[in-house]
Image (tube, rainbow, N blue to C red):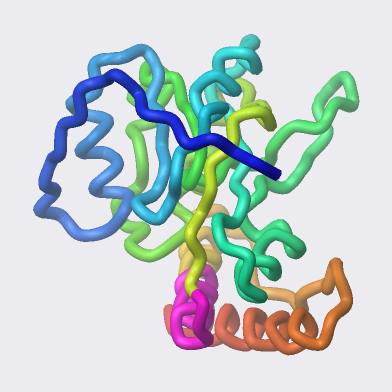
């Protein structure tokens, strides 16, 4: 897929957050944002020309939207993330049986600021991962989430095992925190391989192993 990069004619303000963790930094940014909507992405992502336009076209009555995240690179690690749909929000079914996101991923998400404030923003006790899942679950209590598939962002993924393991270790810790808060079992399960290749088989074993390590690291 060819995506043209775009430069938005807007003022960029860099804010330093003295509290650690992505949840704290996002809350800091949201506190000074003046618009009606909050658009979240990560520092290892690249905007495409559909990033904002896709949200505008997809708006309905939802209070938050999950955009689409695609790997920037073409290496085997990046392909694994795409093929396994690691950063795509999982589907659920709504009243009319239309697919909706169970939660959004903050690599590409848009949230109504009024709703964000109403649920008290991100839980800053999440230091490594899953703060977006937690926020989504609280937003579901006051409104609806929806997909914005035409809003696309490109994500740089690590191209080595060290960072790959670290990412899933953090995801495992996030799972344990969610388990403690919502009293549901979030112990990582064996990974279903969606495209069967030798690399994907091995990567799935590593993913499961390090998610378990992260999960078990929190008592």
> Residue at the spot x=76%, y=79% of the render?
200
In the image, is residue 83 part of the stretch drawn in magenta? no
Q: Residue 191's spot in the image, x, y percent?
A: 77, 75
Question: Can residue 137 be seen from the camera position used here?
Answer: no
Kindly report the secondary structure that dominates the magenta region of the rendered protein.
helix
The foreground one among 76 and 189 is: 76
> Residue at the spot x=62%, y=72% of the render?
75
Left or right of 27: which side holds 194?
A: right
Left or right of 71: which side holds 98?
A: right
Question: Above or below — where is 24 with respect to 101?
Answer: below
Q: Quadrant location of the N terminus?
A: top right
Q: Quadrant location of the C terminus?
A: bottom left
Question: Above or below — where is 141 with respect to 213?
Answer: above
Question: Above or below — where is 39 with respect to 198?
Answer: above
Question: Above or below — where is 138 with respect to 20?
Answer: above
| Snapshot quadrant of residue 30 | top left
Q: Residue 196's spot in the image, x, y percent?
A: 88, 77
Left or right of 189: which side holds 131?
A: left
Q: Residue 137's spot in the image, x, y percent?
A: 56, 40
> Residue at the spot x=53%, y=41% of the render?
153
| Snapshot quadrant of residue 193 | bottom right
Left or right of 110: which side holds 81?
A: right
Q: Residue 48's spot in the image, x, y percent?
A: 51, 35
The foreground one among 95 and 210 is: 210
> Residue at the spot x=33%, y=62% of the render?
127
Question: Can residue 66 be seen from the camera position used here?
Answer: yes
Question: How many labels, in total?
Answer: 0
Q: Tell me where the magenta segment starts and ends, as one range.
A: 159-172
């Amino acid at each position: 897929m060819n995506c043209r990069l775009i430069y938005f004619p807007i003022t960029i303000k860099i804010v330093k957050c003295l509290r650690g963790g992505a949840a704290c930094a996002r809350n800091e940014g949201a506190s000074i944002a003046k618009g009606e909507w909050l658009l979240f992405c990560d520092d290892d992502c690249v905007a495409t020309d559909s990033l904002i336009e896709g949200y505008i076209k997809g708006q309905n009555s939802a209070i938050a939207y999950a955009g689409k995240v695609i790997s920037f690179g073409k290496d085997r690690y990046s392909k694994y993330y795409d093929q396994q749909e690691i950063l795509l929000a999982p589907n659920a079914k709504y009243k009319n049986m239309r697919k909706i996101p169970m939660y959004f991923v903050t690599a590409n998400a848009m949230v109504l600021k009024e709703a964000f404030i109403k649920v008290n923003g991100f839980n800053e006790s999440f230091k490594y991962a899953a703060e977006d899942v937690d926020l989504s679950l609280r937003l579901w209590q006051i409104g609806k989430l929806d997909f914005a598939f035409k809003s696309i962002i490109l994500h740089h993924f690590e191209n080595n095992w060290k960072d790959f393991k670290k990412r899933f270790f953090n995801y495992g810790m996030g799972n344990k925190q969610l388990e403690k808060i919502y009293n549901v079992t979030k112990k990582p399960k064996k990974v279903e391989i969606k495209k069967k290749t030798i690399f994907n088989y091995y990567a799935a074993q590593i993913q499961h192993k390090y998610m378990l390590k992260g999960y078990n690291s929190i008592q």
